[in-house]
Image (cartoon, grey):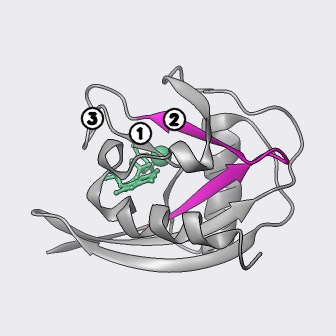
Amino acid sequence: MKNVEIAVGIIRSHDGKIFITQRGESSHLAGFWEFPGGKIELNETPFQALQREIAEEVDIHIHEATFLKTIEHEYSDYFITIHTYLIEEWDGEPFAAEGQPSRWIDEEDLNADEFPDANRSIIEMLKNLDNNI
Ligand SMILES: Nc1nc2c([nH]c(=O)n2[C@@H]2O[C@H](COP(=O)(O)OP(=O)(O)OP(=O)(O)O)[C@@H](O)[C@H]2O)c(=O)[nH]1
Ligand SMILES: [Mg+2]
């Protein structure tokens, strides 16, 4: 089966809100909310892919991010590897640069049922993170 490797950013403001976007109607897993990010291209590190995707999708520029973890998940038609980063500093103001719906949401209100299955363990981790970071 195909393996897709992506990098995603949890863009978190100082007051604990997270910027999420919604997948377009014609895309895979349409209608689910997601963390901005996308596929790692040839010759890119995961962090370089994160920088590029975050700039393309939500128009902010990052110089650093905290690597959180890499998760692997099996969808019915492909495997996915997700490198997850926490972004707390950026230049600019995030907005949905590709016209997709977007919102700031309180960390505690993140609902795993509204995200792709692969995100469940990311959301669980986030809810436990504040004790550690
Ligand atoms: N961006 C993102 N993708 C996710 C998340 N969770 C998850 O399962 N995915 C899956 O990862 C796959 C690739 O992500 P993507 O569609 O953002 O890739 P991309 O930005 O490079 O898009 P493109 O291929 O249209 O250029 C999709 O099938 C998507 O459903 C998530 O939280 N954020
Ligand atoms: Mg994307």
Q: Amino acid at mark 3?
A: Ala
The residue that label 1 is drawn on is: 33
Q: Decide which of 129, 24 is in the foreground and name it.
A: 129
Q: Secondary structure at mark 2?
A: strand
Q: Amino acid at mark 2?
A: Thr
**What is the chief secondary structure element of the magenta stretch?**
strand
Give the residue drawn at x 61%, y 49%. 107
x and y percentages locating residue 30 in the rendered image: 27, 35
Q: Decide which of 8, 11 is in the foreground and name it.
A: 11
The residue that label 2 is drawn on is: 21
Disc 3 from disc 2: Cα separation: 11 Å
Asked whether, in this view, residue 77 is left or right of residue 16, the answer is left
Please say if 50 is above or below 34: below
Sequence-earlier tag: 3 or 2? 2
- Badge 2: few (under 14), some or many (20 or more) residues near its Cα, within 10 Å? many
Q: Amino acid at mark 1?
A: Trp
Disc 1 from disc 3: Cα separation: 9 Å
Disc 2 from disc 1: Cα separation: 6 Å
Give the residue drawn at x 81%, y 44%. 15
